[in-house]
Image (cartoon, helix red, strand yellow):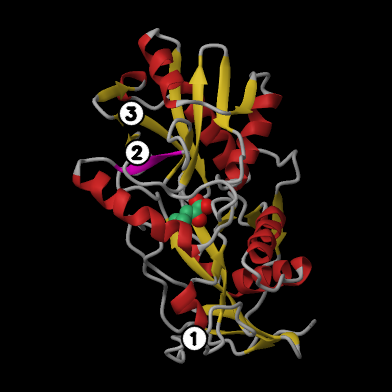
């Protein structure tokens, strides 16, 4: 499928966004949408004004969760160019999620082009403050109305855009994280390494309970022994020991984060000893007690780099780096945001430019 049809409504009023954008609250004027049937493959691609759906009550994803998504960001550089951070890797990951959930893959190049078109059309919505971005949410769901438990025949793929600021209510300040063994998010060979709604549904109760106790998010332990640390609600995690920066290895139950992957590469280039391995909760506690723990930070598209100020596990409360943003964490945050804003040259070919265009009417 090569063609996108356009129904573009040019804005008549100025976009008026508040000073603090929060995350995922505001949406741009247009969306991309296409359909899949086994007979036609992907078809009906269009960019049109953002609209609500009308769905049959038996639509399969509502009942059985055949639903996947991605989250990536576009930025306006200091010299006014528009760029997307690593869309190729995100689209590839979406196709990995699709395969695991018996859903049809998308054409990587076509989706990249559709994404660029949509961003170009709604480019006035891209916020320009450091740390802000246009969040891109591609998603796919099974839309066949059927109550039998089997993969849907038909699917919808959509991209919506949302101008966002900091993910956490704390802004970019350090966060408090609760490691708990009351619930598990997933187990190896489950869906943990896919970006599917089910993983987020599984996380909600634990996150709500943690929030009631004053924590920002939960640190998940492995689903079998609940011994090894895995990931935080919406971030991968890095433990900065004195002589090593370690992050949990991708055992199959951890989301292979794009920011995680970028940070590993940057740290290696900077000469750090970075490892991907199993890290037990006890090892973190021992390092803390022996003064061997320099810091802990999370990485994610939404969160960017987020220092931990407190990590609690059972009755052990570990105040990290005196509750302040780690020096290395800040350096990483700046490295990534400098690439986002174009203040630093993209030497790693991570950004994809979007051509600004006149609105098509
Ligand atoms: C991300 O940071 O990759 C996300 O998409 C987070 C989202 C679930 C809010």
x%, y% of residue 356? 66, 68
Q: How far separated are the C-alphas under marks 2 and 1?
A: 34 Å
Quadrant hosting residue 102: bottom right
Q: What residue is shown at x 65% (from left), y 78% (from top)? A: 358
x%, y% of residue 109? 78, 67
**Mark earlier in primary sequence (1, 3):** 1
In the image, 96 versus 166, the foreground residue is 96
Q: Foreground mark, 3 or 2?
A: 2
Q: How far separated are the C-alphas under marks 1 and 3?
A: 47 Å
Q: Is residue 301 above or below residue 228?
A: below
Quadrant hosting residue 338: top right
Label 1 secondary element: loop
Q: How far separated are the C-alphas under marks 3 and 2?
A: 20 Å
**Mark earlier in primary sequence (3, 2):** 2
Crowding near the residue tagged with mark 1, few <14, some 14–19, many ≥20 C-alpha atoms within 10 Å: few
**Where does the magenta region start and end?**
216-221
* Numbered label attached to residue 181: 2
For the stretch drawn in magenta, the main secondary structure is: strand
* Numbered label attached to residue 184: none
x%, y% of residue 61? 50, 77
Q: Which residue is mark 3?
A: 309
Q: Is residue 234 above or below residue 202?
A: above
Label 3 secondary element: strand
């Amino acid at each position: 499928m090569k063609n996108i049809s356009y129904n573009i409504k040019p804005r008549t009023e100025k976009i008026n966004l508040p000073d603090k954008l929060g995350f995922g609250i505001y949406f741009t004027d247009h969306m991309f949408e296409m359909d899949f049937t086994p007979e036609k493959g992907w078809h009906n691609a269009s960019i049109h004004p953002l609209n609500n759906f009308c769905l049959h009550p038996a639509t399969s994803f509502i009942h059985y969760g055949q639903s996947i998504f991605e989250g990536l960001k576009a930025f306006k550089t200091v010299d006014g160019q528009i760029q997307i951070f690593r869309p190729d890797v995100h689209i590839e990951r979406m196709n990995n999620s699709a395969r695991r959930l018996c859903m049809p893959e998308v054409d990587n190049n076509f989706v990249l082009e559709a994404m660029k078109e949509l961003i170009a059309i709604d480019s006035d919505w891209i916020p320009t403050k450091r740390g802000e971005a246009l969040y891109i949410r591609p998603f796919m769901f099974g839309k066949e109305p059927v109550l039998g438990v089997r993969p849907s025949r038909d699917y919808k793929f959509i991209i919506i855009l949302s101008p966002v600021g900091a993910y956490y209510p704390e802004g970019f300040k350090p966060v408090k994280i609760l490691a708990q063994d009351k619930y598990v998010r997933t187990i190896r060979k489950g869906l943990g390494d896919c970006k599917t709604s089910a993983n987020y549904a599984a996380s909600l109760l634990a996150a709500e309970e943690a929030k009631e106790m004053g924590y920002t998010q939960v640190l998940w332990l492995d689903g079998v022994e609940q011994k090894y640390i895995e990931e935080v609600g919406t971030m991968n995690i890095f433990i900065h020991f004195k002589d090593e920066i370690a992050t949990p290895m991708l055992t199959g139950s951890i989301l292979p984060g794009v920011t995680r992957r970028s940070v590993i590469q940057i740290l290696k280039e900077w000469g750090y000893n970075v490892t991907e391995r199993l890290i037990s909760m006890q090892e973190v506690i021992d390092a803390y007690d022996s003064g061997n723990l320099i810091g802990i930070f999370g990485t994610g598209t939404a969160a960017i780099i987020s220092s931990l100020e407190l990590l609690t596990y059972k009755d052990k409360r570990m105040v990290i780096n005196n509750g302040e943003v780690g020096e290395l964490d800040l350096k990483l945050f700046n490295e990534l945001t400098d690439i986002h804003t174009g203040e630093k040259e993209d030497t790693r070919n991570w950004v994809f430019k979007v051509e600004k265009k006149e609105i098509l009417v």
